[in-house]
Every structure is written in C-alpha cells, then in structure tokens.
Amino acid sequence: MATQQEKKPQDATVKVTVTGKTHVKPGKVIGRRECQLVTFDLPYLAFYYNQKLLLYKGNDEFDAIVEKLKDGLRVVLEEFYQLAGKLGKDEEGVFRVEYDDEMDGVEVSEAVADEIGVDDLTVEEGSKSFKDLIPYNKILNLEGLHRPLLAIQLTKLKDGVAIGCAFNHAILDGSSTWHFMSSWAQICSGYPSIPVPPFLERTKTRDTRVKLDLTLPPNPNADGDATVEPQLREKVFKFSEEAIDKIKSKVNSNPPSDGSKPFSTFQSLAVHIWRHVTLARNLKPEDYTVFTVFADCRKRVDPPMPESYFGNLIQAIFTVTAAGLLSGNPPAFGASIIQKAIEMHNAKAIEQRNKEWESAPKIFQFKDAGVNCVAVGSSPRFKVYEVDFGWGKPESVRSGSNNRFDGMVYLYQGKSGGRSIDVEITLEAGALENLEKDKEFLMAD
C-alpha cells in the first residue's frame, strides 16, 4: 500500500540564518561562449526557477563538507559551464545562454537551521516548512538576464545537511538537472572526471531563431486579477513495489479490445492518480478533466539526441476526457487515452508543435496545464537517491514551492529502490483531504 507521511502543521517554519554567500566559477579558463535558446527552451521563460531539495544525515564536519562541495562544483562546471552563465539576447532579440570568465558564476549560500533535524523535514507533507532551505522562491526564469542560472544553499541542520538548488528552467529540464547533480556528486566522491559530459549543442535539435519581446510583470499573478487563489496543500504518498505491481496488474487485467499493447508502469500509475484525483475533486460527470505529462523527447526527435543532451528537450502532452467517462469505465479506459497520446507524440508531431509555436509564440505560465488537470513532472527514472557526495545517500528528495498549482504531481524514485515510487501531489485542500481517505487510491487492504 501507499504510506502517507505524518501530518504536520502547514504553517510550521524553519528558522534559517544565512551566514555567507559566495560565487563559484569553473576551475579552468573557458573564454566567451554563447548558445541560443531553442524552441524547446523558450516557453519556460515565465515559469519560476525549478527547485530541488536533498536532505542528508550527518554534519560533523559542515565546513569541510561545504568546501568539498564547492571544490567539486568548480570541476563539474568546467563541463556544465552554461549553468555558471547568464541569459542574454543577441542584436536581433533572440534569447541565448552567455558565458564568459568574468561572470560571477553559481551563487552558493551557507546557512544554519540547527533547531530542526532531518527527520522533522522528511515527515513534512508540504513545502512551506522548508521553503527557506531553497533559494529563489518566486523568481522567474526571465530574471536569469541579471541573476545566476543556478543558485545553491547549503544549510547545516541539527543532525544533517540540506542542499537546496534553484535551476533556471529556461535552460534545462529534469533529465539535465539530474545529470548535473549526479555528475557533481561523482566528482565529490572521487571520480577523476565526469563519466558522461553534457551535450551542449542545443541547436543540433532545432536551429530556428525565434525573436521574443517579453514584457512580463515581476510576478505572473500580478496582472490586476483579484481572483482569490484556492488554498493548496501538498503531500507525499509513498507507493511500495508491491503497491505499484498491484496497480499495474489491475489496469492490465481488463485490456481494451483494440489490441493495444500492455500498459507500462508509468501509464498504470498515471491513470490511477488521474482517476482518484478526479473523484477527490467531486467533479460533475460532464466536467472535463485534463491529463498532462511533460514527456522527454530526446529519443523522439529526428535525429534522436543523446541522453546527455543539455537543455530542455521536453514537450507537454495533453489529453482530455469527461470526468464521468474516466471514473465510470475501468482504469484501462483512461490508461488507453494516455498511452495513445504518448505514442502519437512522435517526431512528426513534435515538429508540427514546434512550427505552430514558432509561427505564434506563446509564453506559458506554470499553471497553464489545463482545466481540472493532473500534470505530471519529474520521473521515477531519475536516480535521485544515488546522488551521493561521499557521505551517503539522501534521506529525502523533494521539490520546492515554485511552479506548484492545483493538480501538479512530481514522481520520484522511492527511497527503498526497486519499483517503489514517491508521488508528490499538490491539490486544493478539500480534494487532498478526500484523497487521503481514499483507501482504493492508497491501495489499503
């Protein structure tokens, strides 16, 4: 069954004191480098920085840990130097990543929160209590024009270390984020060099020059709209290997008659979440509900790109049905909708989407995923619990408070490994309370 993390007060806060701030640059001379942002990157300029938090036990040598992390960062940035640069525009208004050796580099803050332990944070259901452990809350990616593209905060806890990172989402996606994190950890663990350097030539996948004249408000919500935002809550539901296998078996027990292939683990878990969130929202049968997944296109584009491609190479795949159809049919009905949408998103569909966007560029806001949506980001394929800097695996890996809206779901590899998966869900408070009581969703006996 899925286990729920112990409920704690949503207004609990961690007292964090920032004790210092430095900048870290690549350890060797790189010179001036420029790389234009491409069609896969540009829609995310109005998202916030993408935040990740890793919690580790042990802090006996915190100062030494900080220096070790900075030393490793200098080495890894020799390959991932774009993260040490800034956003810029060329003379025609085309956005690009710019790097030169005179730039400040990555912002690294040191902090102390010695009144709270790792266990206190790993049982926390939401992100409010650890908000101050991650930099750049509510900072738009567009601000990368005058801010570092990566900011890191290293916080000494009562019995551990928190590594909070904020990545500019306009220059990289989840695959690139975790490629960087694992490479950084490998260098700190004693690797002589990065096993798989990043593939930095993003124009190899798309070379269309899109000129944008962005005049965004400082806050995407600051547009004069007086609409009261719904109260949101977050929770992590941990699905064991056994629970995942049961979900997959149930979805595949009543396959559609059209001869489609068996549903994958992702498709099975996705429809499980979609159906039960839809029920928890108490939608009318005729209400539409949207499922969105941010799909990795590295192997879908023509020509295919290497896994090490550094940048954004994702596209949102949308599918929609009526709540009554989704809930009233067996799980295979919704799984089939998801499966078909994913399979249809081939190189031709990607090319068509790019051409449509280039002819009429639309800068998305993070909450544009659709009505009554369930939007899945991150992936259990990312080996987040193998990010070991030399003192053990993380106790917990979480997303920060940025880019959250009603229906946002992050999937992570479960800490217990194997096929276990952590499901981090943000929902309107009443719907989340309903989901917490849904024994079928929790796979409770």
Image (spheres, grey):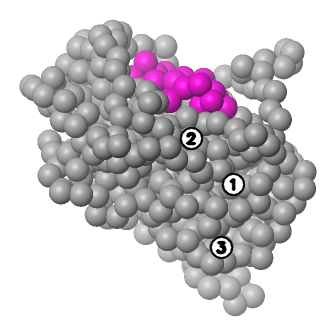
Amino acid type shown at disc 3: Val
238 to 305, vertically: above or below? above
Tell me the residue at 30%/26% (across/down). 154
Residue 282, how many percent across, how many down? Answer: 75, 41
Quadrant (top left/top right/bottom left/bottom right) for the N terminus? bottom left
Magenta stretch: residue 278 in it?
A: no
How far apart are labels 2 and 1 at the CA level? 14 Å
Return the residue found at the far left: 60
Q: Identify the secondary structure beneath mark 1.
A: loop
Q: Earlier in the sequence, mark 1 or mark 3?
A: 1
Circle on res. 98: 2
Q: Identify the secondary structure beneath mark 2.
A: strand
Magenta stretch: residue 137 in it?
A: yes
Front residue of 236/292: it is 292
Q: In the drawing, does residue 225 fall left or right of residue 330?
A: right
Q: Earlier in the sequence, mark 2 or mark 1?
A: 1
Magenta span: helix, strand or loop, mainly? Answer: loop
Residue 184 seen in render: yes
Mark 2 surroundings within 10 Å by alpha-carbon count, few (fewer than 14), some (14 through 19), many (20 or more): many
* Stretch of the chain drawn in magenta: 121-148
Residue 379 seen in render: no
Amino acid type shown at disc 2: Glu
Residue 193, how many percent across, how many down? Answer: 24, 57
Q: Earlier in the sequence, mark 2 or mark 3?
A: 2
Mark 1 surroundings within 10 Å by alpha-carbon count, few (fewer than 14), some (14 through 19), many (20 or more): many
